Image (cartoon, rainbow, N blue to C red):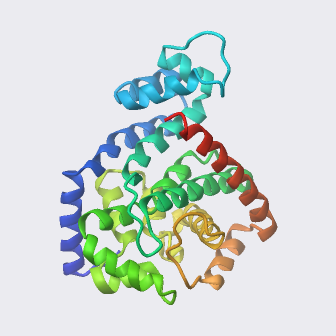
Amino acid sequence: MGLNQGSQEVLSLIIDLVNKSDISSIKQIVSDILEVIRDEDSSAKDLKDIIERDPPLCARLLKLANSAHYGYAKTISDIQEAIVCIGFDAVKELALNQKVCELFKLENVRHGYSRWKLWKHSSAVAVASKLIYRREFRERGDDIYVAGLLHDIGIIVEDQFFPELFDSSLAIVAEGERNLPDVELEILKINHAMVGQAISEDWGFPDELIQAIGYHHNPADAQKEYQQFVYIVYVANYICQRDKIGYVEVNKRDISGFHKCLDALKISERSLGIIMEDVRAELKKLDELESFG
């Protein structure tokens, strides 16, 4: 990251605060689900063992499996059976969404920002990243879904631990002339991408996730071996911001940088248009499933 000593000291303090806070509650389940995602031999039982350690998540999945949405005649009371009914891949995403969503529940709207609007944006970036990866590169996209979901975790951290300074940043961004990452650097001496990268490194996340979270605003600075992964998250973030899904932290978009990423990935705007139609449909489906929470 090329940090000066002052910035490094601030990030070290933040990591300590995060690890003693409710934010750290997502660390274990996200890490465990990532392990299942990355193990080709993982099974419904492996996922069941993780979910059963989180009673609210268990209750939600059982409620969903027994809902009219799935329409099973018999009552489902076993988590493994619920995973089979709902679908292994769907349950992985639902479990991640449920756990990460806990951080975004505070609804305190100011200067056009709220955690709930940020959650909507993060969910959209997760879905868009996954669909781009699957359709354009024939990759499963599980890791990149997590990267999209957590790319703005640094904003939550700033909101929680530096509310007054963060509020000052939001106020400047709301004037419509500047972008949040630049204002954060000026006021906080760090920005949310740097915070997210530091946390994901401390939590031992895979390198491609660390890079995507840390460089989702400046993908050209990512390590070369991870640039495709980072470019996809950048593109997903860009188009979700452009389409004003959830909280928009960027007033001046880097159109040139966006097209450089598209050229490097060999993706057309037309393909992105089709993907965004499906992103909206999937987000609508997620909203319906959230009603069972």
Image quadrant of residue 261?
A: bottom right
Image quadrant of residue 120?
A: bottom right
Q: Residue at x 81, y 67 (%)?
A: 270
Q: Position of residue 113 (x, y in %)?
A: 45, 69
Q: Residue at x 54, y 40 (%)?
A: 290
Number of numbered labels in the structure image: 0
Q: Residue at x 39, y 46 (%)?
A: 102
Q: Nearer the viewer, residue 141 or 123?
A: 123
Q: Nearer the viewer, residue 139 or 125?
A: 125
Q: Position of residue 204 (x, y in %)?
A: 33, 50
Classify residue 171 as left or right of residue 149.
left
Measured along the vertical axis of the image, is residue 131 above or below residue 211?
Answer: above
Measured along the vertical axis of the image, is residue 249 above or below residue 80?
Answer: below
Residue 184 appearing in the image = no
Quadrant location of the N terminus? bottom left
Report the residue that reaches farthest toward the bottom: 177
Q: Nearer the viewer, residue 91 or 261?
A: 91
Classify residue 287 as left or right of residue 183.
right
Q: Nearer the viewer, residue 192 or 284?
A: 284
Q: Position of residue 32 (x, y in %)?
A: 39, 37
Classify residue 120 as left or right of residue 204.
right
Report the residue that reaches farthest toward the right: 270
Q: Residue at x 18, y 51 (%)?
A: 20
